[in-house]
Amino acid sequence: MGTPDFAVQSLRRLIEEGYNVVGVVTMPDKPIGRHHDVLQSSPVKKLAIEKGIPVLQPEKLRDEAFLSELKALKPDLQIVVAFRMLPQVVWALPPLGTFNLHAALLPQYRGAAPINWAIINGDKETGITTFFLDEQIDTGRIILQERTPIAPDDCAEDVHDKLMMQGAELVIKTVRLIESGQATATDQSQFMTDEPLRPAPKIFKDTCQIHWQEHTLESAYNFIRGLSPYPAAWTPVIANGKETEMKIFKASPVPSEGGGNGEVAGSGLRLALPGGYLSLDEVQLAGKKRMPIADLLRGTKIEVIQS
């Protein structure tokens, strides 16, 4: 069960290992295009169709027709990767249970956007966890965990791709343990530390606005890379005299002992913040293409509105 690219590699590895994937559950096709008259299949559905695997796309997971189709597949085990919360009638169906691959070291970062929030918070390490589903979101008993470092210049896409590959291998390891009867599951309370739990709530457009006055150099840099390339941090700007929005995909921190006070430094897009200066390197004005800042400044005068 899954929808985005993150889930594709796990499905691919299960197929490569010769497991009998009796069906795939994914989101309904998404309307796209100017008039929303074109339906786009999920990445998981595309792979499933290519491999001849039956696909179920329920609007509602409690729908009787969907439940009947799912039961007819007679799954021994269900695997969830980047999907939505399942009702008990679904996750309790197979005799071997249902496990989830989560892109964080549970119990930290329960929620929809663990990769983004780990980088935004400046973590130096993250990881992946497989756990059996229960009634609450991301609270089930842990089967396996693996750690991976977050490099100082990693953006969300970098970490996503690393965890996607690492996670697919962890899925295979977990399936092997379960089918051999050797899987043990540990309550998440055994993984608690003195560190307060950090949530990973879904990210919306308002979440992505940079409020410069609230940031230091380090936190602004982490915020930008934690949201790059999607959905991308943004800031209001004045471009050639008109107020608009500008996404920031890439920035470079320049630490300085004296720091700054949050004002634009010089004529370029280098912002002075407590701790040093932040150079905005790759950006996109609303309605325009993503481009290096040098290209944008050739024909556009930009003033960042710092709130």
Image: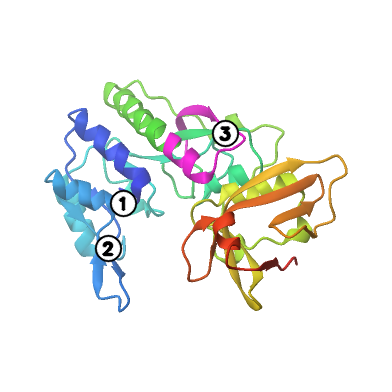
Question: What range of the chain is rendered magenta?
Answer: 140-162
Residue 103 visible here: no
Of 291 and 174, nearer the camera is 291
Q: Which residue is mark 3?
A: 150
Q: Residue at x 74, y 55 (%)?
A: 271
Amino acid at circle 1: Val
As displayed, is residue 210 above or below residue 74?
below
Magenta stretch: residue 187 in it? no
Give the structural element (helix, strand or loop) at label 3.
loop
As displayed, is residue 181 above or below residue 115?
above
Marks 2 and 1, Cα distance to the nearest angstrom? 17 Å
Count residues near mark 1 (Cα–Cα under 10 Å), then give few for <14, some for 14-19, many for 20+.
Answer: some
Magenta stretch: residue 151 in it? yes
Count residues near mark 2 (Cα–Cα under 10 Å), then give few for <14, some for 14-19, many for 20+.
Answer: some
Count residues near mark 3 (Cα–Cα under 10 Å), then give few for <14, some for 14-19, many for 20+.
Answer: many
Q: Residue at x 63, y 33 (%)?
A: 124
> Residue 90, which numbered label?
1
